[in-house]
Amino acid sequence: MQRYSIFSLARNALTGHKNWQQVWRSPSPKKEYDVVIIGGGGHGLGAAWYLARDHGITNVAVVEKGWLGGGNTGRNTMTVRSNFLREASVPFHEKSLDLYHELAKDLNYNLMVSERGMITFIQSSAVNRVQMQMANTMHIYGAKYRMMGLDEVRRRVPIFDPPDDMRLPIHGAIHQPRASMVRHDAVAWGFARAADARGVDILQQTEVTGIARENGGVTGVQTNRGFIKAKKVAMAVAGHGSVVADMAGIRLPIVTQPLQAWVSEPIKPVLNEIIVIRSYHGTYLMQSDKGEIVIGQGADPYPSYAQRGTIPIIEDATAAVLEVFPSFERLKLLRHWAGMLDMTFDGSPIISKTDVKGFYVDVAGSGGFKTTPAAAKTFAHLIANDEPHVLTGELGLDRFHSGRLVPEGGVSANH
Amino acid sequence: MLLIPCPFCGEREEDEFVFGGDAKRERPTDPTSTSTEQWVDYVYNSNNTKGESLEWWWHAQGCTKWFRITRNTVTHAITPESDR
């Protein structure tokens, strides 16, 4: 792998940028792999890299029906945070934040981690109570989450200007300083480049059409480029979890729902923090590095595979943003899109073995970008050892059998 | 914006309605002979159909009628149940 640095940049600038190497290979599929990972997004590519680096398993293929990061890795709003409610969730999401902060160095790839901090407005005593409970759980695991008065909100966010007669007045806020924005494409590309350098085959435009099984275990995957034998098959798809798991005869506790986002035209920097207006359906906004105001809300209220969303959500969330930030009124909207969430029954991820031996599933639940590195690392551990990582012991499919759920639906369904 | 055909009020915009779930989901009829696995499958697992899906909808902001439609979860094309 050609290492990137200020020196390689200078050297290549002086030689007319003609000597950059290709970032990853495009090999033909081998007949057999130890592990085939379905899904070339952040989770799948990351799991491949951790398998190679931490577990010495390099005879691995990542099969992707489209292009790398072209699914929901490229459709989220790039926010990473760990403000969650349950003891099974907070350390997992904290680990993800830790890994995001060190990955750029490990991957030798700039992920453009921008530690903005997240301010969540408190507009009711119910929200206040939940946020305090979250703060207490988070403090146990060393995650900083603190109350913030309106004076400090005004100091940090000068453009904050809600009307006096606001329907649900803002009484204060709560702040996670370490919440960040991360360049989402770079996460897929960085993992892909580093995994490829360790011998992982990345097979783009390779669609899995069937999962072969014998005697209760997987034997390989049928693809549009032929049959590929595999000792283990790991599914890391988002938005099509039920469809792929069905090929292995597994039913999952998920519903596929669109999660929309839209951005304004770019403007000069006015908003450093990520803002969440929870009482208006979890509306959130932030300013991207390019200057666009990015707006989103919770998931659409009915299942869909359409990769586009419903209009009332756009109207609702934009109205919420304009009530708190009336000065954005004249901004023009530039783009709108929807990603797909494989929303789990309890809102938490599933990283699990299944009843089919050698078939593993990683379902992001409520939006998997923030969990990418932790999910990839723990998923690789599970694939390599056939036992869950200590961080995901309570995130297996067996929780739906025991009834020991990890309910995060109310605090997770956005970004 | 979906235009949903309420059998009583006719086509109305989607924000008058509440999605009521998969209409093909069937509660086990006899609790005494239903295994834990069957209950788990009924309570948690979903068909999550890609394509034509028979669904319950509730006209909460209108006549409050519960009714079923077939909706394609990829194209969002809707067929009222009476047309089938």
Image: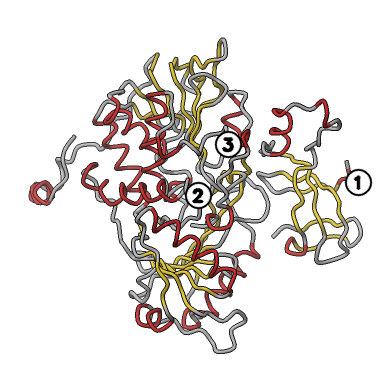
Residue A25 lies, in percent from the top left, at 29, 30
Circle 2/circle 1 CB separation < 8 Å: no
Q: Residues within 10 Å of mark 3 (few under 14, many from 20)?
A: some
**Residue closest to the eye, A55 or A231:** A55
Residue at x 71% of width, y 39% of height: B43
Residue B1 lies, in percent from the top left, at 69, 60
Callout 1 amino acid = Ser
Residue B82's tag is 1
Callout 3 amino acid = Arg
Report the Cα–Cα distance between label 3 and label 2: 20 Å
- Which residue corresponds to mark 3? A399
Q: Secondary structure at mark 2?
A: loop
**Residue closest to the eye, A51 or A41:** A51
Report the Cα–Cα distance between label 2 and label 1: 37 Å
Q: Secondary structure at mark 1?
A: helix
- Nearer the viewer's eye, disc 3 or disc 2? 3
Where residue A46 sits, quadrant-wise, is top left
Q: Residues within 10 Å of mark 1 (few under 14, many from 20)?
A: few
Chain letter for mark 3, please. A
Chain letter for mark 1, please. B
Residue at x 45% of width, y 38% of height: A392
Residue A164's tag is none
Q: Secondary structure at mark 3?
A: helix
Circle 3/circle 1 CB separation < 8 Å: no
